[in-house]
Amino acid sequence: MADLRNCRRCGRLFNYIGGNAICSTCKDEDEVDFQKVKKYLYDNPGASISEVASSLNISIEKIRKFLKEERLEIIGDEGLPVLECEKCQKPINTGRFCDACSRDLATGFSTVARDIEREHINSRNSGENDSIRLRYLSKNLDIPNKHKKGFRK
């Protein structure tokens, strides 16, 4: 079933499939802006964020978005803290998390995944799933429930 949403940026209705809640037209516009930034940085290596933003008429916030998506990287330490780790607030050059917090998150996810897998294997081996019983809950009032008193065939 389609998940229809309004684009956060332009308000158009679109089929949401995950990720950023913007329509394909706005995503295409972002890609055009990114390609402009990429070309500008190729022609002007080491340009500052404010220089790129003013030269291309692209918002600093959009450039920060490209940094968070790891499509751009801050070089040197002069520009810090443009981005901060979302977990420990340490200044970073690209992405959402510093290296240490990224490792911690990855380790945590791996541990949880292993625990879930072990729990699933243990429940399957112990036969717990065999003891789970189901019944149909009718929301249609015309279908009688044969387990109630007074049910007749």
Image: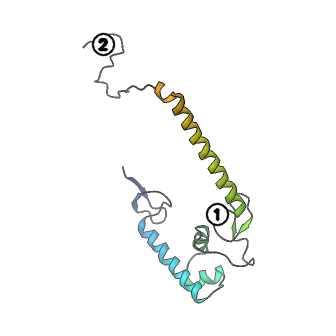
Q: Quadrant of the C terminus?
A: top left
Determine whether, in the image, residue 2 is placed left or right of residue 99.
Answer: left
Tell me where residue 64 sits by quadrant.
bottom right
Q: Residue type at mark 2?
A: Phe
Q: Residues within 10 Å of mark 2 (few under 14, many from 20)?
A: few
Q: Is residue 20 above or below residue 74?
A: above
- Residue positioned 47% across, 63% down in the render: 22
Front one among 140 and 86 = 86
Residue shown at 51% from the left, 79% from the top: 35
Q: Is 106 drawn above or below residue 111 in the view shown?
A: below
Please state if 14 lies on the left or on the right of 126 as rendered.
left
SS class, disc 2: loop
| Number of numbered discs visible in the structure rendering | 2
Q: Position of residue 140 (x, y in %)?
A: 31, 28
The residue beneath circle 1 is: 96
In the picture of the structure, the residue carrying the numbered disc 2 is 151
- Residue reaching furthest front? 125
Q: Is residue 8 above or below residue 48?
A: above
2 vs 1, front mark: 1
Disc 1 residue type? Arg
Q: Residue at x 73, y 79 (%)?
A: 76
Query: With respect to residue 129, does 52 lie above or below?
Result: below
Residue contact at pointers 2 and 1, CB within 8 angstroms: no
Earlier sequence position, callout 2 versus callout 1: 1
For residue 120, the mark is: none
Q: Quadrant of residue 83?
A: bottom right
Task: Determine the residue positioned at 64% across, 75% down.
Answer: 73
Q: Is residue 57 left or right of residue 134?
A: right
Disc 1 residue crowd, few under 14, some 14–19, many 20+, Cα 10 Å: many
* In the image, farthest residue toward the left: 153
Q: What separation in Å lies between label 2 and label 1 (alpha carbons)?
A: 61 Å
Residue 53 percent location from the top left of the image? 60, 80
